[in-house]
Every structure is written in structure tokens, then in C-alpha cells.
Image (cartoon, rainbow, N blue to C red):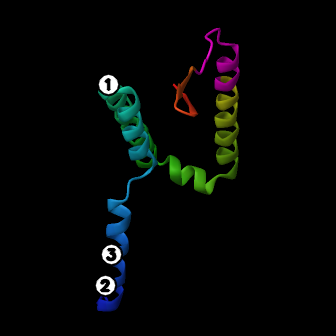
């Protein structure tokens, strides 16, 4: 039988975790407010796709494999690091310029 004091401590803690927004929710709201509805929907679809891939990998047993086989875990870490390096190099080699426009409001400068 579950103790009543444990339940009384557990339920508020769980409610706080459920109600508080995570990084994915904050990202979606930020994109929606800064770039509009389409960007918010794209952010929500992107984070939901990531969660779906993660859950699918767990269902297929990837989590168990990585937990029991150190070599597989190390291989996945290096593949992930190589992919991040690839993305960084691709970003640096991109010809598009990233410019911040500056406008002045009163005495303070605001970046667009």
C-alpha cells in the first residue's frame, strides 16, 4: 500500500513538472512570437518529430543496446559529434550574410 504522506508529496511535485513548460515549449512560443504563426507551427512540428524519433528508437531497443554496449554508445557519440562538426562547417561555408540591423529608440539602440 502506498503511504498517504508519500502521495501528498509526490502529486504536487508531478503537477509542477507537468505544468511547467520545457525547452521545446519555450522555443515554440519564442518562434511564434518573433516570426509568426508559420514559424511556430514549424517549430512545434520539428520538436514533435524529434520526440517521435526518440520514442521510436526506445521502442526498437536502441536505449537498451546503448546501455549495455559501451562500444555502441561511444560510436553513437562520435557520429553525433561528427554530424555537429559537419553542420558547423556547412554554416561557416555558407555564402549568406548574417546581418543585424540597428535602430535607435530614444537613448538606447535596439537590434532588429
Coordinates of residue 24 in the picture (x, y in percent): 42, 44
Look at the numbered discs 3 and 1 and tell me whether their residues touch, using CB distance below 8 Å: no
**Camera-nearest label, 1 or 2:** 1
Q: Crowdedness of circle 2 by 10 Å Cα count: few (<14), some, many (20+)?
A: few
View extreme (front): residue: 106
Mark carried by residue 71: none
Disc with the residue nearer the chain's start (1 vs 2): 2
**Camera-nearest label, 3 or 1:** 1
Judged from the image, the secondary structure of the residue bearing numbered disc 3 is helix
Q: Is residue 97 magenta?
A: yes
Disc 3 to disc 1, how far (Cα)? 35 Å
Coordinates of residue 70 in the picture (x, y in percent): 68, 52
Q: Is residue 49 magenta?
A: no
> Residue at (33%, 61%) from the top-left corner?
18
> Residue at (29%, 90%) from the top-left corner?
4
Disc with the residue nearer the chain's start (3 vs 1): 3
Dividing the picture into quadrants, the one containing residue 11 is bottom left
Q: Is residue 22 visible?
A: yes
| Left or right of residue 26: residue 15 | left
Judged from the image, the secondary structure of the residue bearing numbered disc 2 is helix
The magenta stretch is 87-100
Where the N terminus falls, by quadrant? bottom left
Q: Which residue is mark 1?
A: 38
> Residue at (65%, 20%) from the top-left corner?
91
Q: Which residue is mark 3?
A: 12
Q: Which residue is mark 2?
A: 8
The relative height of residue 41 versus residue 94 in the rendered view (above or below) is below
The front one of 29 and 82 is 29
Q: Crowdedness of circle 1 by 10 Å Cα count: few (<14), some, many (20+)?
A: few
Amino acid at each position: 500500500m502506498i503511504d498517504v504522506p508519500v502521495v501528498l508529496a509526490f502529486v504536487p511535485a508531478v503537477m509542477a513538472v507537468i505544468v511547467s513548460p520545457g525547452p521545446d515549449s519555450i522555443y515554440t512560443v519564442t518562434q511564434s512570437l518573433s516570426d509568426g504563426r508559420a514559424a511556430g507551427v514549424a517549430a512545434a512540428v520539428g520538436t514533435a518529430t524529434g520526440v517521435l524519433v526518440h520514442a521510436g528508437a526506445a521502442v526498437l531497443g536502441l536505449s537498451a543496446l546503448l546501455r549495455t554496449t559501451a562500444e555502441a554508445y561511444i560510436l553513437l557519440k562520435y557520429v553525433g559529434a561528427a554530424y555537429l562538426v559537419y553542420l558547423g562547417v556547412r554554416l561557416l561555408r555558407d555564402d549568406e550574410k548574417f546581418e543585424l540591423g540597428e535602430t535607435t529608440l530614444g537613448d538606447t539602440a535596439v537590434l532588429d
